[in-house]
Image: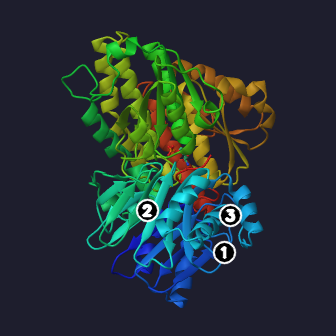
Amino acid sequence: MCGIVGYIGSKQAPSILMEGLSKLEYRGYDSAGIAVHDGTKINLLKAQGKLVNLAKMLENNQIQGKAGIGHTRWATHGAPSDINSHPHMSEDRMIAVVHNGIIENYMEIKEELSAKGYRFVSETDTETVAHLMDYYYKQGHGFLESVFMVLERIEGAYALGIICKDYPDTLIAARKNCPLVIGKGQGENFIASDIPAILHRTREVYFLNDNEVAVIKKDSIDIFDRDKNKVDRDIFHVNWDIDAAEKGGYDHFMLKEINEQPKIVQDVLSIRMKEDEDEINLEGISLRKDDLKNIDRIYIVACGTAYHAGLVGKYLIERIARIPVVADVASEFRYKDPILDERTLLIVVSQSGETADTLEALRIAKRNKARVLAIVNAVGSSIAREADDVFYILAGPEISVASTKAFTAQVVAMELICLHISMETGKMTKAEFSAARAELNSLPGRISEVIQKCGEESKLAEKYINSKNVFYIGRGLDYLISMEGSLKLKEIAYLHSEAYAAGELKHGPIAMIEDSTLVIAMLTQEELFEKTLSNIKEVKARGAKVIAIALNGNDSIKSQVDDVIYVPRSGWMTAPIIANVTTQLFAYYVAKALGTDIDQPRNLAKSVTVE
Ligand code: M6R
């Protein structure tokens, strides 16, 4: 949610800032801007719309300078417009600020500053920071001291990059509840919301913690805590491949990421399961028999797609390990005074590791002495750093706003954790474990098969492109996967779609079914097949067109529906993961046929760092 980049060194900043912003555009793309210090003054360029608009502006306005900050915005306060774009500056251009997050008390500060004669031009909360900085600075406090004073005053969440006209050699960064990394180069340094923005330039990064401030010059990086004490920070070496954050010949990141799934699953399985061992290797994660004895309540909390993975986790843990689990969306969990104590295990799931609500759920749990296990993709993210234990899904950078590979890896992580708990608590025999392991081991090959035969999804996408309402239905795990399939279609194709437990249709939603309503029925759970089939008949009788997603060999379904997409036959635990790849591809091809912006769908951002 909003991308920040900053540079200070001996090279020209504008192109480096633009390069960084191009890698961060997935975080927000309704406007972008840069502020560059040319040694004597700060020059500003900003433009509504995608980064390409700013790039065109830059071609016509060659600004120069060796220090600067850049921003790509996802609007919170004020509509997308040139004037609301970041960076924001004080009136005499003394201070320039880029910000990710929300300053909650900005109205109060704005009123105070307005009374002092400050003139606000935008509707944003961020402009308050620029003027407040200017106010303290003009009172005679230095650049750094003014930053500390501003941080004392503002409430909310922020990652900030700030430059000052009087300090051409200094860039200051600060963070609270929003991600920020500092990249260390040779005679040059960087800041960024996310590693891909600076990976072309350096692999050595420092993660800034909450309430810390960094003073960055071309040859030095000094980090201070909120009490202004210098802190030592270990450098983190980024070892993933730059290619992982590039499209690599695919039309879209989403398609590339769908294609990466077999390998990702293979990799995580090979680390976590050994052929000759009857256990999952959870490497120090405290979920052994003795730890589990001390747990009497499990919550799984997440948002969006990660929540859907959490629902699968709940289903599996309850069904196999026979432990009750409450799954909740983080934005609800955090405000309902959940029952938490030292006997609670909270499992949070997050691709980015930075989602504001999920992070807050984790913090509430920790304040109440619960144990927190995080299932996370982004290494070194806030959630990963604050959790007691981390299960990294190792899916590599996910750039497409619509999550695909992270979901698959999160569900696999859930399955592994469930098997582990079941073995530790004696709810699973060795023979059952071996069967489950074999099933999991067959996943990469079966997902590959679906991806290779994507012609059916593409053909049906064209056929049903004019659907106005789409229902995804299923029972058991199929229902949970339906939710994810439906979300994908909404996100990238902007088609109205709903997911329903198939048996729930007749309790209301069936009233929506009319001629040509599209129903996508998931049928991978063989024990529930007949039940879902009855529901298919009910919607067919009311004029719906039905696509069934069924297991290979299920010939009987053909005569009951309009179209069938067959997926490789697999056990009940893994078949829905395979079927989900089908729904990813279907959503992708519908969106492609409709010509939407697949990787950067409207109104969305990849990492939701505000409430
Ligand atoms: O980074 P997180 O996994 O915490 O993000 C949670 C959701 O914002 C995310 O899954 C969102 O729903 C995606 N756009 C889904 O494709």
For badge 3, the amino acid type reads Thr
Q: Which residue is mark 2?
A: 192
In front of the other: 216 or 237: 216
Type of the residue with mark 1: Asp
Q: State whether residue 509 is above or below residue 158.
A: above
What residue do we see at 55% from left, 66% from top?
A: 98
Marks 1,3: beta carbons within 8 A: no
Percent from the top left, x then y, of residue 170? 41, 72
Find residue 239 and report its image quarter.
Answer: bottom left
Q: How is the image coloured?
A: rainbow
Q: Say which residue label 3 marks.
A: 124
Vertical comparison of 96 with 375: above or below: below
Check disc 1 and report the residue beneath it.
Answer: 82
Q: For the residue labelled by badge 3, is the local secondary structure a helix, a strand or a loop?
A: loop
Query: Do we see residue 198 in this rendering?
Result: yes
> Marks 2 and 1, Cα distance to the nearest angstrom?
22 Å
The residue furthest front is 140
Label 1 sits on a secondary structure element that is: loop
User: Residue furthest toward the left?
Assistant: 276
Does the numbered disc 3 mark a residue whose Cβ is under 8 Å from ligand 1?
no
For mark 1, does the 10 Å Cα neighbourhood hold few (<14), some (14 to 19), or many (20 or more) residues? some
In the structure shown, which secondary structural element does the residue marked by tag 2 occupy?
strand
Q: Are marks 3 and 2 in contact (CB under 8 Å)?
A: no
